[in-house]
Image: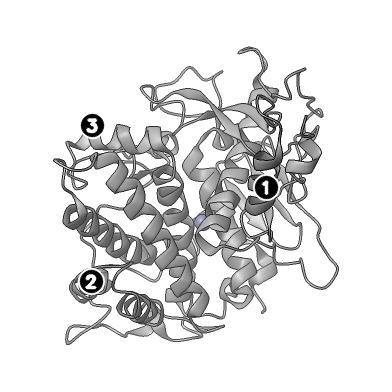
Amino acid sequence: MVKTSELEKDGTEAGDEGTASTLAKLIAEAPVGVLPMTSGARMKIWKQDPTVGELGIRKVYIHTKVNPGPRDSQIKIEGVPVLYPDVNGDFLFESNNNEAIDAAHTYAVVRQVLTMYQRVLGEKMKWQWNTGENTDPISVFPHAGEAWNAYYSRSERALRFFYFTPTRSRPSSQKVFTCRSLDIVAHEVGHAILDALKPAWLSWLSPPQTGGLHESFADCTAIFLALSQLDQVEYVIAQTKADLHQKNVLAELAEQFGYELGRPSGLRNADNNLKLSEVTSQVHDISKVFTGGIYDTLADAFLAGRDPRKKNDAVVLYEVGQKMATLMVSAFKAAPARNATFADVVDKMITIANDNPSEYPQYATFVQKHFEFREVLGNSAVAGPQSVAGFPLNTAGCCGTMQNLEYAGE
Ligand SMILES: [Zn+2]
């Protein structure tokens, strides 16, 4: 029997050299009829959030080793009682144990975001403080306290998800937990990942567009995470009849939170037509322009790649989602270390797509078209104060991350 411990390491992901080839060798050398032991853990996650009932809460498989907590080498759940796996190594809990369900769900979604980016980048992700010998994980608090908010903090090395009592329509005893939104959890992990790649971008002294890029990266992380899950991709195809400009759960971000604020199309909607001249210097407002350009590019690339006679639409959308995630995160990595503008990142996307035409057929054309329309590129480009360092960056009303005072003086 091949031992589990030989097949996996705590938190091992793509990018750890030799993992796949080691596994292939072990399987090839195992006696006939003896298969490697199943490893990893089953958990349940809200596939969108409790208001998206058709997708609901489902089991997912985390293929890496999950320790009691749950925790692994990169993530540790805190602020709730430690959870232990059952005899099968799974973290599945009774429906009345909300604390345990929320802890397992939140761990799983953070883990899935890391796994997704590790796959597209082909390297193990690090947190901002993982320099030199430091390998400290991020602390994740699913029940951080009462507030209409969630945030990532570098100084706390933490993600905090709060809960609140809604004021609309719901019985007042029924709280809304931000951790139960896949979009909100993915959004905050996105902030943490980008902070590791570009630590100067959270500074309040950056141009408003740099703050907008942070918020957009966070929202796009939620979109790409959904696109990396086969059931969600299939759901979106059926929901839209393969037209991504129809109302759908992919474009609508944080549905439940948005509903409580009286927004029937989510907290933000990626399928928008906003141009730079139409938004304020509030970072979420600006971010919608960039996210909209990414979403339109994704929709075009999907349309261009569709051929339902030969391939299932869901497979095409999954593949396009992975490519767009790779293209976007690669462009963010290649952008300037500080004061980056939308045009800086978009230029890198076009360069990378042009340099790899077989991987990104027509993508450069789509990016150019949509970011010209949004006044980021071309004759109608609006540079404006939003691209100038020192122009007051407005973080009012946005998620708690960019409001953290720790970034004020940098
Ligand atoms: Zn945010």
Pointer 2: what residue? 374
Q: Position of residue 268 (x, y in %)?
A: 36, 49
Q: Is mark 2 within 8 Å of ligand 1?
A: no
Asked if residue 55 shows in the view, the reply is yes
Can you say whether 97 is above or below 351 in the image?
A: above
What amino acid does circle 3 point to? Ala
Q: Residue 67 occupies which quadrant of the picture? A: top right
Crowding at dot 1, Cα within 10 Å, few <14 / some 14-19 / many 20+, comes out as few
Quadrant of the image occupied by residue 357: bottom left
Q: CA separation, marks 2 and 1?
A: 51 Å
What is the total number of numbered labels drawn onto the structure image?
3
What residue is pinned by disc 3?
Answer: 238
The residue at which mark 1 appears reads as 25
- Amino acid at circle 1: Lys
The residues tagged by marks 3 and 1 sit, at their Cα atoms, a distance apart of 40 Å
**SS for tag 2?**
loop
Front tag of 2 and 3: 3
